[in-house]
Image: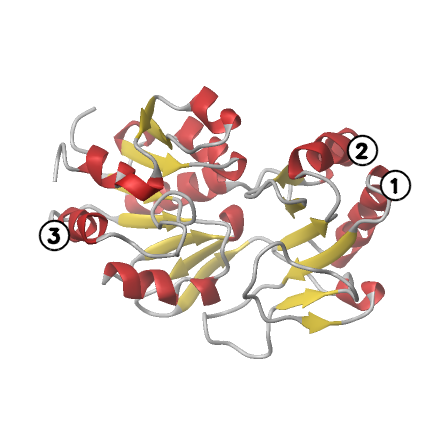
Amino acid sequence: MQQPKLVACDVDGTLLDWTAKASPRTADVVRRVVAAGVPFVLATGRPPRWIPPVVDELGHAGLAVCANGALLYDAAADGVLDTITLPPLRLRELAELLARAIPGCLFAAERPTRSAREEPHEFVVELDYEHPWVGPETVIMPRAELLGHEAVKLLVRHSEMTSEAMAQAASALVGDCAYVTFSTSEGLLELSAPGVSKGSGLASLARRLGVAAEEVIAFGDMPNDASMLSWAGHGVAMANAHPTVLRVADEVTAPNTHDGVALVLERWF
């Protein structure tokens, strides 16, 4: 492709290494992209409150498609520009379906927010829910209360299953009631409103900026990135990517630990 007019990049497993750091080479090419007047957009399953550390790593506060496409966040202004939620009735319906599809599963919800620093905390879990990675602060509440407030993401956890197996079991029952995906294989599903994905979020942002799909390059590594790589004019998978992403990519670059994003962007910047 010609020099892209918009660069969209997943964060974990793509832009950052396994210690959540951006290499000097990667940070440098991001600065050159921005200096050329090309938007560098983060496209992530992370909520806005997990974006400031990435901004610190890159030295750039731009736009971010968060929560797998359900939120559009402006890191420079620390404000959410757009939100698409699952209403309480739909959350309860999904929980009933998922409890049948995946017996013993537990739930958490990422609630909408207006900024990265807004209180009270937006991530709520039911008792005994354990996140597959260390870090997120949680508020524990009964399942009925958890499902009683709109959410941008419903998270489903089963520590004795893979995410792949959970997705297979859930998709048959959930159908068109929600978009089902995952960003780790460690027994965690992420559900958003029907049709809401990184692909739809990036498409909406590109329309705001007047950029066509064929002018966009996108990078990713996990199934929640597949819709984005399919939509973009040029989709790039990391060498460490999930097979689902490798199948839809136009190109495979080096792994996230070996400056895979920089290797591609240095062609133009």
Going from N to C along the chain, the mark reached first, 3 or 1, is 3
Q: Which mark is residue 100?
A: 1
Q: Residue at x 60, y 78 (%)?
A: 120
* In contact (CB < 8 Å): disc 2 and disc 1: yes
Q: Is residue 243 above or below residue 201?
A: above
Direction from residue 210 to residue 72 in the image, left or right: right
Which one is closest to the eye, mark 3 or mark 1?
1
Name the residue type under label 2.
Leu
Label 2 and label 3: CA atoms lie apart by 47 Å
* Badge 2: residue crowd in 10 Å (few <14, some 14–19, many ≥20): some
Q: Which mark is residue 223?
A: none
- Taking depth in this image into account, of 113 and 185 the one nearest to the observer is 185
Going from N to C along the chain, the mark reached first, 2 or 1, is 1
- Taking depth in this image into account, of 151 and 18 the one nearest to the observer is 18
Q: Position of residue 154 (x, y in %)?
A: 68, 53
Q: Residue at x 37, y 43 (%)?
A: 14
Q: Is residue 224 above or below residue 122?
A: above
Direction from residue 190 to residue 97 in the image, left or right: right
> In which quadrant of the rendered view does residue 101 lie?
top right
Going from N to C along the chain, the mark reached first, 2 or 3, is 3
Disc 3 designates what residue? Answer: 35
Label 3 and label 1: CA atoms lie apart by 51 Å
* Badge 3: residue crowd in 10 Å (few <14, some 14–19, many ≥20): few
Q: Position of residue 114 (x, y in %)?
A: 49, 69
Q: Position of residue 97 (x, y in %)?
A: 84, 42
Instruction: Tally the numbered discs.
Output: 3
In which quadrant of the rendered image does the N terminus lie?
top left
Label 3 secondary element: helix
Residue 233 in view (yes/no): no
* Badge 1: residue crowd in 10 Å (few <14, some 14–19, many ≥20): some
In which quadrant of the rendered image does the C terminus lie?
top left
